[in-house]
Amino acid sequence: MEKSNPVIKKLDKPVLTRHDIPYRTALTFNAGVCKFRGRYVMVFRNDYGDFDARKLEGTDNGLAFSDDGIKWDVSPKPFFHVETDEIKRVYDTRLTVIEDTLYVCFACDTRHGLRGGVGKVKEDFSGVEIISLSAPDNRNMALFPEKINGNFVMLERPMPVYSRGGKDTFDIWVCDSPDLVYWGNHKLVAGVEDVPFADDKIGPAAPPVKTKEGWLTTFHAVELTPGRGKHGWENKWEKTYRAGIMLLDLEDPSKVRGICKEPLIVCDRDYELEDGFRQDAIFPGGMILEDSGEVKIYYGASDTVECMCTADVGDLISLCLKP
């Protein structure tokens, strides 16, 4: 069985599952996580329906808090849900604190394509004020935790099927904005061809964290194996999602200082594999650098549960800069 990089230390169980949710749920995964005003905050994707019947009916997003980043107190009602004539659902959030304001990035399915959004979490955590939505098709947006050269900066993953050969070949880009509304200066950060364990697509994962050597950045990398067969609830699931790690330049994050050529996190624990909706899928959404140098990485596993692992920041940087 494929194994996660040995610098990673996983917990003995997920940090959040459907059994922890006090309202209707089936799958609980792909959470955005950050540390805000002394507490850990999580906004998790909640696909509700009937787990035993393998039936899904809709998506909302839940809210949870923690004092240690491991044991979570889930709010009694869903936190973030948008459904209009145009927007069908929002999901896969990322949380970023910039100048003591908590921002959220998210994906949304609309009648006219997939869009990425940026919003601000209300002070009382009663909801989200949407600031901007991208043009289709774009998703997996993640804000940097501070302005760079006076501008907000964001990683993104546009989905140019037509211009990339008529199939999935999606890459990581970066853009900036003076106000979180008007985005431009788009630059390629890394392409699928730069990642040996991806042949289908790559995309931003957790928002980057700042280190002395650069912006430490996780990403998801997807490998397609035609004919792989049934690996989950659907008739077939031919993709494997792994997490990778790279280091971006502090002043110009479109420049990659180094990228680990091997996966950082893969599904290798029973709780990451059993009963998975889409098995062999790792999707990081939160990364926290503690004062001790410990890095907490939060990730969805098999589109079913939310997990967490830790690593030393120096070890992660060394992986990126390894010749």
Image (tube, rainbow, N blue to C red):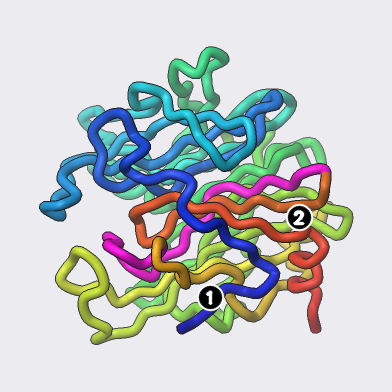
Label 2 is placed on what type of residue? Trp
Residue 92 seen in the current view: yes
Q: Nearer the viewer, mark 2 or mark 1?
A: 2
The label shown at residue 24 is none
Please give the name of the residue rendered at 39% of the width and 32% of the height, measured from the top-left corner: 62
Determine which residue is flagged by label 1.
192
Question: Most extreme residue toward the front, as rendered?
Answer: 12
Quadrant of image for the C terminus: bottom right
Quarter of the image where one finds residue 63: top left
Determine which residue is flagged by label 2.
215
Quarter of the image where one finds residue 186: bottom right
SS at circle 1: helix
Per the rendered image, the range of residues in magenta is 272-291
In the image: residue 304, left or right of residue 183:
left
Residue 258 pos. (x, y %): 76, 72
Please give the name of the residue rendered at 30% of the width and 44% of the height, measured from the top-left corner: 109
Could you tell me how far apart the alpha carbons at marks 2 and 1 are, in whole angstroms? Answer: 20 Å
Question: Most extreme residue toward the top, as rendered?
Answer: 124
Does the stretch in magenta take in 295? no
In the image: residue 8, left or right of residue 162:
right
Please give the name of the residue rendered at 75% of the width and 71% of the height, measured from the top-left corner: 320
